[in-house]
Amino acid sequence: MQEMKVLLVDDEVDFTSAIQKRLARRGLTVKVAQSGEECLSSLEKFPADVVVLDMKMPGMDGLHTLREIKRRHPLVEVIMLTGHASMESAVEGMDQGAFHYLMKPADLDELVYKLEDACKRKEIRERKIRSTDNGEES
Amino acid sequence: MPDRQYYRSLHRSMAFTVVLVSLMPLALITLIGGYQYTEIYKGRVMAHLEEIVHKHEQNIDTYLLEKVGEIRVLADNMGVDCFLDEGKLENLHKSLMKRHGGGFVDLGLVNSYGIQVAYSGPFRLGLADYSQSVWFREVQKRTVYVSDVFLGLRGVPHFIIAVQFESEGKKWVLRTTIDFVAFNQLVENIHIGRTGLAFIINRRGEFQTKPRIDLSAEVPFLRELLQKATTDAREEGSFALKKARDMVVSTIAPNPLTGRETIFLSTPLKQGDWLLVYQQDSADAFSDLAQTRNLALVVLLIGVIAITFVAFYLSKRMVKRIIAADKEKEMMNEQVIEAGRLASLGELAAGIAHEINNPVAIMVEEAGWVQDLLAEGIDKNGNTDETKRALTQIRTQGARCREITHKLLSFARMIDPTTMELQLNELVEEIIGLSNQRTKYANVQVETELARDLPTIAASPSEMQQVLLNLVNNAVDAMEKEGGTLTITTKRDKDDVLMTVADTGCGIPRANMQRLFDPFFTTKPVGKGTGLGLSIIYGIVNKMKGEISVNSAVDVGTAFTVRIPSAAKTGVPSDENAEERG
């Protein structure tokens, strides 16, 4: 299996750097972004499989960013990180096409499993698209 | 809480209003109805009396005409010879007595010289000379004459009917004496009530009948009445004269005899020679009316007393209810304020939970990182340094948590609604500190312009906190979509403190301005806002004798200005209280 590429989006630098280190140790390629805007711009250069997105951020908030990601990169999977009080935004995020949501602070192992699941789904969908494309061509 | 004076005046004005409103129609009905009834009743009584008098007038006239008619029949048919014969005359007289109920006391024939030549009757008058009598002179002029009542030759009250007739070229007069008692009875029969009585007077004011009581003192007055009746008739002309003879004239005047107001009814008799007078005291004639009036007055009085009593009793009960309701309302207000405080706290808590969540998440991750490192082996290259860095990070984040919890605790501690002297600027700083998480995520820039020389205000810290927190929350809500700038300004205005909380948010539509401070008015979706915030602020500011005003333009922003009197103006609560709180 190809190495998973993950983009971490959170306004707390200390938080993202800690997670980045831990995920990197588990063999994942991790990049960080501190805001929705940064997330979108780095997605242009960095072909991430999964985006881990904090819902509550100053500036462009999580839902807004999610909508943009889904519009620009429909195949990229998104896992949301939410606070306790923002279950509503979590539900809305799921409606908008997020893969899953996790309560903050999340267990790292759980996050890794979810990341793998998301990756798998992405691969399957990519393969499907490719085969239909081929079928159409032949 | 309104004082006793207020409730007392409320009670009074309520009672007076009820009394006034109830009594006005009652009094009007009584007055109008009473007046109308009195007029109608008086009219009826007068009409009734007039009718009676009129009837009797006719009776008396008929009686007299009858007597005259009978005598004339005799004079026309019997011939002088028959009267001259004493035996025949006596038979005639007896027959008259028998057939006409004893009205004719005697019967006599008088020759043209006034000498009575024949006589039948109890007085044995024989050859009396009437040549000087008034009636004899009158009958020669008028042919038929009915005299006034007089004592005459016999010294007994009587009156005479005399008829002149011609026989064989000689003039004779047939005269008869009419029994005064029988005639008197005709009039005496008119006897109504206690004081109602009737009598007949002639033109000179002499009584023709004998009234039940002595009325001689009334004579001058009656004469006047008589004159008036006749002059009235004369003034009206010949046609009216004739009519006036039949008419009953009524007067209500004080009776000179008794001094009481008396009704006089008079009608002419015997072609105006006599006057039938009926008199009765007004009080007696209208005694039923007086009774009715007294009854009405008693009922009115009872009504007034009952209404007054009920009005006072009811309004007292009402005011009691109002007092109870006011107390309840006050308690409710306190509860609403508390509920509102909790609601704004809840909003705050959501922000704080997120704020506390971040350092916790970092700590969890750093701890996990350390575990990872330990699993790898602490002595491997650089792992020790990395562990140290991670632990420092955990400490830093822990300290961050502690700071947040301290802030919250200091907020929660101040729930005492007691008024104390406090500096508004400090409170503003505190609220901004509490809200910075919310403002940060809503992209709101917070700016403050706090006057340094701001006087202290006398307020409850928790209530003031609520005012500020609600205003700030509202401002942030208004700017949530696009961010903006929140400006809190405090300044001194003479003895007042002015605080303005301005935002650059969506503004308030003009239509909502009117209801802005109404409880439960909210534009937020169901479940998001209670609609209590501004109404609570309004209540709190009002309680402090302050004012709150709003200035807003859609899509430009809103500014709430709160004016609070300084502590120096309102009077500072005692130091003892402030110290107790610590």
Image (spheres, coloured by chain):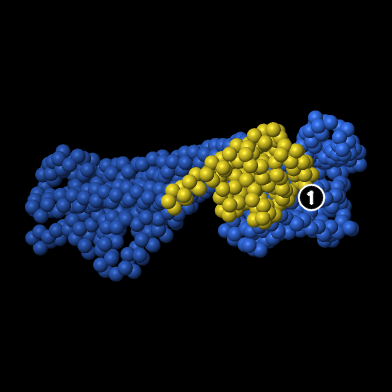
Chain colours: A yellow, B blue
Q: Position of residue B419 (x, y in %)?
A: 82, 43
Q: Is residue B86 above or below residue B173?
A: above
Residue B113, visible in the rendered structure? no
Tag 1's secondary structure?
Answer: helix
The quadrant where residue A115 appears? top right
Q: Quadrant of the N terminus of chain B?
A: top right
Q: Position of residue A50 (x, y in %)?
A: 63, 44
Residue under label 1, please give it: B432
Q: Is residue A79 above or below residue A136?
A: above
Q: Residue at x 63, y 62 (%)?
A: B555
Q: Quadrant of the C terminus of chain B?
A: top right
In terms of depth relative to the viewer, which is nearer, B529 or B423? Answer: B529
Q: Is residue B122 above or below residue B511?
A: above
In terms of depth relative to the viewer, which is nearer, B20 or A103? Answer: A103
In terms of depth relative to the viewer, which is nearer, B104 or B415? Answer: B415
Q: Residue at x 17, y 42 (%)?
A: B100
In the rendered view, does B442 fall on the left or right side of A134? right
Q: Residue at x 88, y 33 (%)?
A: B379
Q: Position of residue A69 (x, y in %)?
A: 60, 51
Q: Position of residue B560 (x, y in %)?
A: 71, 57
